[in-house]
Amino acid sequence: MPTVSMKYFKDHVPSSVFDNQANLAAALNGLGQRSILESDEISPLTLRMFKMQHGLNEIENCVLNLRPLTFPVIFSQQGHYIGPQTNGELFGTQAPSGSIEYVRSYITRRDDWTTDPFATPPVYNYRFERADTDQIRIINDNSKVHTFTLHSGIYDFFVNLDSALDRIRLELNSIYFDGLKVLDNSRGNKYWNQYTDPNNGIVRAISAAGFAGIVRVVTGALSTSIDQRTSKYRNRLIHDGDLEIHLDRLSGSIFLPDDPLATPLVFSTDLLPYVQSIFADIQILFRDIYSEVINDLNARRRVPLI
């Protein structure tokens, strides 16, 4: 049975701007060095990017489930309201002032619907925030907001981000140098931040060899920003366990601690836009790195380049 190749990240996410993995593979293949980047079956970088995407999807789903829902309010002649059928039945009482007071309110399936405002909801655990006559906001009070899935998504995202950056480091070491020669016992030469530091010996060697483009990208603002924004969370997850989080049910947001090592913890980093921004930036960074590597390979026609 024929197989479908999903080797590159763009095969999984067609909208991704990281669209030149196949081009770099072709450039290396022309020099007999494709194995630096991939095997016949898999690209190690794609695997890490895919797991990052999976973690991001889990985070997005958890935030979506947490967010309050807003519906129009429709009053019946008895002073009760019933909300949109597509989201179940909403039941409550209208206060004399015209606002909504919810002595007992719930969402339930239509076949479980009852006119008894004090009936016990069969499945759901929601509460209604006080609202005006035009709309109502439903706040999820369920204490089990997919917390395992949420922590799993956070772990997958940050740990695979760290692994993806180290994978890029290994590829650059192998393309520009003899990869084994630069993997010494120096901490600065084992981690991605060797490339974000313009004073690192490896970066200086690449610059001295005339490869200004790749030096500009790896030491640039986007590269250093990704490292600075994520290293504290990556280190915490890899070395210490998990990250404490704060669920804000009123806003429907999940917050990371600004500094996971601080005392007391301050939660103002909104998780979802934070990881979405990082994931968008890292795709741009990887695309730009690969573009410069392709240019250098086409110009020098050898591996290693230095």
Image: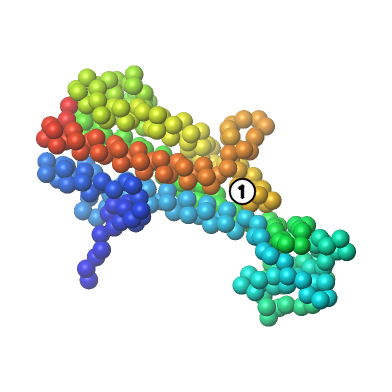
Q: Quadrant of residue 84?
A: bottom right
Q: Is residue 40 visible?
A: yes
In the displayed orientation, state which residue is furthest to the right: 96
- Image spot of residue 148 (x, y percent): 57, 54
Which residue is found at the position 67% from the left and 51% from the top?
Answer: 249
User: Which SS class for mark 1?
Assistant: strand
- Image spot of residue 13 (x, y percent): 36, 55
User: Does residue 162 appear to the left or right of 261 in the view shown?
Assistant: left
Which residue is found at the position 30% from the left and 56% from the top?
Answer: 11
Q: Is residue 222 above or below residue 19?
A: above
In the displayed orientation, state which residue is furthest to the bottom: 111
- Image spot of residue 305 (x, y percent): 17, 30
Q: Is residue 196 above or below residue 56?
A: above
| The N terminus sits in image quarter | bottom left
Number of on-image labels: 1
User: Does residue 260 appear to the left or right of 111 in the view shown?
Assistant: left
- Image spot of residue 276 (x, y percent): 47, 46
Indicate the amino acid at tag 1: Ser
Q: Quadrant of residue 225?
A: top left
User: Does residue 52 appear to the left or right of 263 in the view shown?
Assistant: left
Residue occupied by mark 1: 253
Q: Is residue 15 above or below residue 103?
A: above
Q: Which of the colour schemes (rainbow, by chain, secondary structure, one colour) is used?
A: rainbow
* Structural crowding at the residue carrying mark 1, measured as other residues with C-alpha within 10 Å and reported as few (<14), some (14–19) or many (≥20): many
Which residue is found at the position 83% from the left and 72% from the top?
Answer: 79
Query: Which sits in the foreground, 225 or 156?
Result: 225
| The C terminus sits in image quarter | top left
Query: Which sits in the foreground, 180 or 149?
Result: 149
Q: Is residue 210 above or below residue 111?
A: above
Which residue is found at the position 33% from the left and 30% from the top?
Answer: 218
